[in-house]
Image: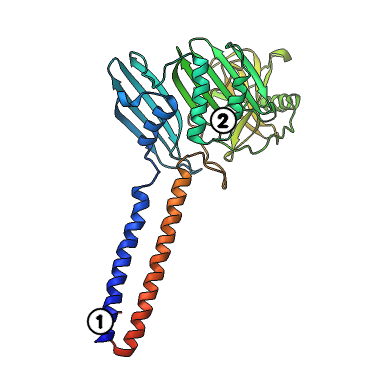
Amino acid sequence: MENETCVKQIWHNFVLVTVLACLLMQAPNALSFELTNQEKAETFLGNVVGLDMARYEVKLISQMDFPADASGVSTATMLYNLKAQGSTLEVICKFRNNVLVSCNVNPLEGTPLMAQPITNAFESAKNFLDRYQSYSKASYIQPMRNMLNTVTELKPMTASSGDLKLTITTEDYLYIEWMNTPKGIHNMYNRVILAFQNGAFKMFTDSWNRYPIGSVDVNISKEQAISIAKDRAQSFSYEVGNMTISDLAFLDKPEFTQAELTMQPRENALYPHWEVILPLEKLYPGMTTSIRVTLWADTGEVISIKATGSLGFPMLEDANTPEVSPPSGAISENPNHNARKENQAGNGYIAAGIVVSVITVVAVALTLKSRKNLFPFF
């Protein structure tokens, strides 16, 4: 009887410990600093954009979630309506892998209600960067802030510091762009953009870590790129309806031939890339005035040859271009990432503790069973 009472007490204690441990495992999730995308959006609007969120009624109008693509990147777009007395805003927030990467604020009625008075767009931009750096903990923000400190007059300008390029335009609104230009190569994929209208926040985009840099080696010069393009374009033909258009006559005026060097994605990283525009002597069927040839500047491999109706207007970023997650081992810019890791680690320690408790109780019970056979359920 004494052994049986002892074993029952041990079992009772074990059940109690297990229940308490399970509750502890749930506690980190309940108290977690990991926010939902909707909570992140509202936090961003208040803590970074500077809206007086206490005065707004926030309504989520729609949400579009897209699962991870082949490169492991998931996206979500959320449309909000913020309404207060005398002010109604439409807000669009985009997330990449649950990290907010863009935000647009469009006033539908009145002007945005800010927590602090608006001074001017330039000061608003500086204050935004300060708040965004505190929010994101992104190390690349401080050099951008330093460059902005060197600007003494708000006017259209371009300046570079190392691989960082600052562009400011001041037409209908203040547009500020920082671009990562490795070795000075234009790179529309890795940028931070801010826009303000009448001193109030208008738009923000952070794609700085969208792609890693694969290489900046330009082994094919501009002259070589044009020569390769011309050689490959000589045998090019294209279809218009039932017709095949071939034997194209190229304009023999080098000053009209264009070649632009940019960074473009290949195998989930960025590489130098030539876009060559070869003008034609006349207008061909399909409103074709030139041939566009693209090739990699590091290998010389031709990517595409296409008929075009332009004479080389700047390429627009393809909205369907696949996005890529940061390389393995990269530090996440998500301010909640570390908190999530700590919670997972804490759960791991608790789980390990439960396992130890189970083993201990089972061992004691088996020992007593061998003596009195009191626990047939083991």
What is the secondary structure assignment of the residue under circle 1? helix
Give residue 93's quadrant in the image: top left
What is the secondary structure assignment of the residue under circle 2? helix
**Disc marking residue 141:** 2
Picture coordinates of residue 206 (x, y %)? 51, 30
Q: Which of 188/47 is in front?
A: 47
What amino acid type is highlighted by mark number 2? Ile
Q: Farthest residue in the left direction?
A: 1
Q: Which of 116/190 is in front?
A: 116
Q: Which of 194/200 is in front?
A: 200
Mark 1 crowdedness (10 Å alpha carbons): few <14, some 14-19, many ≥20? few
Label 1 belongs to which residue? Answer: 5
Residue at 34% across, 54% down: 26
Residue at 74% across, 33% down: 219
Residue 229 seen in this snapshot:
yes
Give residue 262's quadrant in the image: top right
Q: Is residue 338 left or right of 314 when viewed as pictured?
A: left
Asked if the residues shown at circle 1 and circle 2 are in contact, with their CB atoms under 8 angstroms apart, the answer is no
User: 209 above or below 127?
Assistant: below
Picture coordinates of residue 92 (x, y %)? 39, 26
Residue at 29% across, 74% down: 11
Sequence-wise first label, 1 or 2: 1
Mark 2 crowdedness (10 Å alpha carbons): few <14, some 14-19, many ≥20? some
